[in-house]
Structures are given as structure tokens and as C-alpha cells.
Image: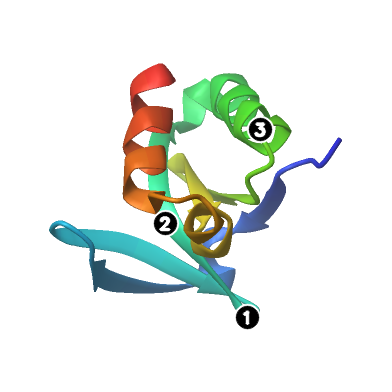
Amino acid sequence: MTLPLVINESQVRPFKYWQEGIQQGIRYNNDLYAHFQSYSKTERLKAYDIASEQAQKGVSVCMTVSKTHYTIWLSLRSLSHATHGNQLLNKAKALS
């Protein structure tokens, strides 16, 4: 089982990209991630559970941590391996 990568938010580089609208993304090392969901600091366990669920589905997951929130990011590479990456992202958001 692959576990989500958990890193400090200060270690990533944010960017924006176009996919049916302006989307948020991050770069960590040489990987690009799409914003999935954000949670308050008090929802740490929920955030990690959701990130773990996505990882179990075979998606590479990165969770960033800040002083105020947790954010789950899904690998754009993992999503692009699906036939319709944006549809997969929207479906995953709807199921969570």
C-alpha cells in the first residue's frame, strides 16, 4: 500500500494552470500535483484518511501541512494516465 507523501507547505512551489478553468497546482521535486481538497488544522485525521483513500486507488498523493490547514494534492501524472484526468479529479472530489 502506498502512503500519501506529507510535507510542509513551504517546501512546494505553487502554480496555476488551465483545465476547463484556472486550477491550482504545486510542484514538489520534479512532480506536479493538482489541488484536490483542503481541511482546517482541526481536521487532520479526516484529511489524512481522504488522502489515504486516494492513494489506495493508485493515485500518487501529496498532502501539504501549514500552521492553519492541510491540503491534499493529486499527481497530475497519475491523473493523466487516466483517459480523462479532469473527469477523474471531479469524480474523486464528488465521492469524498
Q: Residue 64: horizontal and vertical position, in percent?
A: 55, 52
Q: How far apart, in angstroms, are the residues tagged by discs 1 and 3?
A: 22 Å
Which residue is under mark 3? 57
The residue depicted at 55 percent of the width and 29 percent of the height is 47
Which residue is under mark 1? 30
Instruction: Give me the disc on residue 73.
Output: none
**Element carrying mark 2:** strand
The residue nearer to you, when weighing 79 against 66, is 79
In this view, the mark in front (1 or 3): 3
Q: For this view, does 71 lie left or right of residue 15?
A: right
**Element carrying mark 1:** loop
Q: For this view, does 61 lie left or right of residue 27?
A: right
CA neighbours of label 2 inside 10 A, class few (<14), some (14 to 19), many (20+): many
The residue depicted at 27 percent of the width and 71 percent of the height is 16
Q: Residue 78: horizontal and vertical position, in percent?
A: 58, 56
Question: Residue 79, relative to residue 50: is it above or below?
Answer: below
The residue depicted at 32 percent of the width and 36 percent of the height is 90
Quarter of the view holding residue 25? bottom left
Which residue is under mark 2? 34
Question: Residue 42, relative to residue 39: is it above or below?
Answer: above
**Element carrying mark 3:** loop
The earlier-in-sequence mark between 1 and 3 is: 1
Query: Is the N terminus in the top left, top right, bottom left or bottom right quadrant?
Result: top right
Q: How far apart, in angstroms, are the residues tagged by discs 3 and 2?
A: 16 Å
Name the residue type under label 1: Asn
Q: Residue 65: horizontal and vertical position, in percent?
A: 56, 49
Q: Residue 67: horizontal and vertical position, in percent?
A: 49, 47
Name the residue type under label 2: Ala
